[in-house]
Amino acid sequence: MNDGLIADLELRSILSGVLDGLEVIHARALLHRDLKPTNIMLREDGAQLPASHTVELTFILPPDSVGGGVGNVPGILMKSNEQARGTPLSGLAVKVTDGFFLVGLSNVDADRASNLHLLKERSWFDVPLVMSTSAAPSSPSKRALPAN
């Protein structure tokens, strides 16, 4: 990439990966939404993001909130009920901006299979938060929509 421009060969490589992914999605009759150039994520070295799925987390806190905002999201835990101990999804969370995190779920075959199993079988998720100035307990959440 040079000054925001992508060379023809590099663009062909990126689009080839996107089309391969779409072929798999369509072959499995899965739904995809909002496919556009700004939603194709690349690493700084230009390689495509090695994630099977991404989760966007946005935190809007009141200006007087204690803790200075969300500093880190260690991951996402899947739970069978509110009191159960959670099992982490395999992935990596990164802070994009204040209050906005992106969690990339691992695309390694075994991790992807485990993540999909957890997402289908467990209806509660827990998002532990580390506040900028202190730790805060997480709040378990029940999924509003069934996992597909």
Image: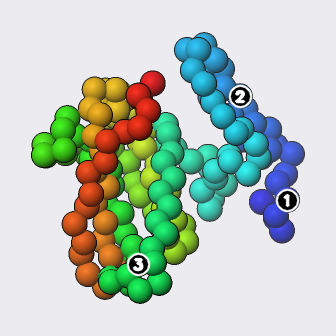
Q: Which of marks 3 and 1 is nearer the N terminus?
A: 1
In the image, 34 versus 93, the foreground residue is 34
In the image, 74 versus 81, the foreground residue is 81
Q: Which of marks 3 and 2 is nearer the N terminus?
A: 2
Q: Can residue 148 be seen in this view?
A: yes
Tell me the CA gap for discs 3 and 1. Answer: 35 Å
At 80% from the left edge and 38% from the top edge, which residue is drawn? 12
At 83% from the left edge and 68% from the top edge, which residue is drawn? 3
Q: Residues within 10 Å of mark 1 (few under 14, many from 20)?
A: few
Name which quarter of the figure residue 133 lies in: bottom left
**Three-letter code, disc 2:** Leu
| Residue 62: mark in rendering | none
* Residue at numbered disc 1: 5
Give the quadrant of the C terminus. Answer: top left
Q: Which of marks 1 and 2 is nearer the N terminus?
A: 1
Q: Where is residue 131 in the image (x, y as percent from the top left)?
A: 32, 76
